[in-house]
Each structure stands twice: as C-alpha cells, then as structure tokens.
Image (cartoon, rainbow, N blue to C red):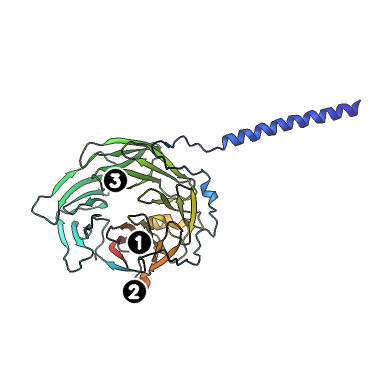
Amino acid sequence: MKRSLSILILIALGAVLLVFSYFYFFSNTKNNKTDNSSVTETIFPSIGTLRETIGNAIGLTKDAGKDKSETRPADFAGINSGLVREITGVPSPGFVISQNGTSTIFYLNNQKGTIEAVDIIDRARPTETVYKQVLSDVYQLAGNYDGQTAVILVAAANLEGKITKRLLEIPFPDKNRPVKTQTVAGFGSDLAISRENSQIVSIEGSGGKSILFESGGVLAAKKKISELPLSEWQLELLDNNLATLTTNPAPRVPGYLYLVNLGTGARARLLSGPFNLQTKMSPDAARILYSAGEADATGLYLIERASKTIIPIAAATFAEKCVWAADSAVIYCAVPKQKITGADLSTWHRGEISFSDKFIAINPTSGAVKDIFDPGITGNTLDALSLVYKSTGEIVFINKNNLHIYVLEIN
C-alpha cells in the first residue's frame, strides 16, 4: 500500500512539473517576440524591421573587424584608381556643394571668418570671397547650391554655449544681386537643409524624447513632423523627402536606426541592437551600411532590406567615413590603415587619436572591396571625415588633422 502511494505521489509530481514547464516555455516564447508595432508597413511597404538581437546574430566577435585579404572583383566597371588633391589651405568647419553638375563649393575660411567659393576642378580659377561679414565660433555649415544661389545655414556657439543660427542666400556667379541674410530662431542645434526645396530640418531632444521639425521651405514657420524616444539622434537627409535618425554611438549601449517620411511624419525602425552604431543609408533607401562593435573590435556591414541579408565587409572603418555614390551602385570609404576598435570611436571624436586612411570602393551587391588610393604613396597622412559624393564623380571631404578640404577624384 505504501509502495503504491509513493508511486502515485511521484506520478502527480511529474504531472505538475510537466504543466509548469509547458507554461514557462509558452510565456517566454510569447514575451521574446519582437514588437513590430512601430513599423507602418502601409506607408513604407518595403521597410522590414530587423530583430532586436541583430547585434548578436551578425557575430560581433573579436575578429569581426579584422582585415581579410581583399577581393578585387571584375564588377567595378570604370573604377580603377583615385587621386587626392588639397582644395583649401585653411581650416574650415564644413562646406556646401552643388549636385547639378557645378564644380563650385562654398566653405567658411576659419582664419578670416568669411565664406569663399572655389572651383574644385578648374584649378586656374581663383578663390572668391562671397560673404565678407566675419563669422566666428561656427561649428556647422549646411545648405545647397543650384548654380545660381547658395542657400547656406550657419550655426555658431560662443563660449557661454549660446547658439545662433543664420541663413544666407548668396547669389553666385552673378554677384550683382544682393546677399540676403536672416537670423533663424526656434530650431535645435542639429540642422540640415534638403536639396529638393531648401526646407530646414531639425531634431530637438529633451526629457528623454526628441521631436523632429521642418520648415516647409526657407524661413517658413516650423512644424512638427514626428516624435521619437531618447533625446540624442544624428540626422541625415535622403532624397524623396526621407530622413534617417541614428542614435549617437556609444559603447555597451544598443543603437537604433529610424527612417522618417518628412511629408507624412510616418517612421519605421530599421535596426536595433548593435553597440557603437553608425549608419549610412543608400540614396535609393534599399540598403544600409553600418558599423558596430565591442570595445576591442569593430566591423562594417551591409544590409539588403528586401531580403534582410547581412554582408560583412572585409574592411574595418566607421560608417561616417563612408559615402554612397548618387546612383547607390558603389560605396566609397576612408579606411584607417591601423587596426581600430569600437573604443577608438569616442576617443577619435574627442580628438585624442587620429588615423592614417586609405580609400576603397565597395560593391554593395556582393560586398567586394577594391583599393583605389593610398595617400601614403605621396607622403600625405589623411584622416577623412564629412565625405560628400558629387554628381560629377568626385568625393569632397575634410582632413580631420588640419580641417583642410580635399577632393578625391575617381579615375
């Protein structure tokens, strides 16, 4: 009798454990599902949200950012090599270019405080001062040039932290028309101007959230576009009235990437999870180039959004050192010749370290890499940032070592 009772007790306990295990597994499975409620597929039909665990899924190991033997594919038609030239011999915080075939760029001469125009192709053409009023403490230039008028937004911060923003409309090359200038109020410190309609776009963050605003046109009243969590984002404008917002890169902090339709305010989360995240989306919004990594490693990756496939790139650099060609067919990157880690990103931003870069081209379909120029062969050390691709085939950038502007000509 006692033996039978013991058996019955064991069977009952087994049944209880089986039921408990079932509910535990079901609960965890339910709770671990990714919440895609923030994605509006009807407005962005081709946007797919990647899983929260993507940072682990892509294998961010110590070898993730290690240079592999670079492939030299046959599919880099028309890209053989490059040549770098210095455009300005003075430091500048930024420049404004044209995408309509004009080879003139506008930049702030930090030594004089004036805005000047220079032709990056016709070296015989002299540099011209187009705005003579002295500008000081400038940290950002944004704008566009349509071949007739340069619309330039200048942001400056004094020692007390007061930020002033001024919008300039500079006629060029016809200098008979007057320069228009006006103070811009009510926008945050991170600004951009779209190429399509010169609308001012601004992201303003406080209290753990951010609001995206746009002006609807030069000096028009601003209106709210969208609201996002977190208070610090990096803003980049694309074509077709789209913008990307990426969280500031940080070690041991998951990064996020959102795509926002500036016309409707709809937003979609495209990427979440990787540490030290930086992103560059292709102009056609079909692919995402991003860098991410741990303190002792960093890697460069490509995401094809339609298939959600991830391609590791055999080069280690930060995404902000890269730029897409206008047709989204090629990516150009400045790659440090020394090994870099995720921890190097913040120290590089603070100016505590610098890099010696070479330039490469990446095929975004295959991920293949090709060397195009090493400034070291001419005795130069370049640490490239703020890369911009011109529709005429040049890449304009700033050398972080001296803040001079350079151009990379692709042959």
Is residue 350 among the parts visible in the rendering?
Answer: no
Residue found at the very far right of the displayed protein: 1
Of the two numbered discs 3 and 2 on the same chain, state the one appearing first in sequence: 3
Tell me: 322 left or right of 178: right
Where in the figure is residue 92, as x and y percent of width and height? 26, 59
Q: Quadrant of residue 269?
A: top left
The quadrant in which the N terminus is found is top right
Q: Which residue is mark 2?
A: 378
Q: Which residue is mark 1?
A: 384
> Between 138 and 240, which is closer to the camera in this rendering?
240
Tell me: 151 left or right of 9: left
Q: Which residue is mark 3?
A: 191
> Between 166 and 292, which is closer to the camera in this rendering?
292
**Residue name at image x 36 percent, y 56 percent:** 324
Q: What's under tag 1, amino acid-wise? A: Ala
Where disc 1 sits, the SS reads strand
Q: What's under tag 3, amino acid-wise? A: Leu
Where disc 3 sits, the SS reads strand
Calculate the distance from the C-alpha at mark 1 to the C-alpha at mark 2: 16 Å
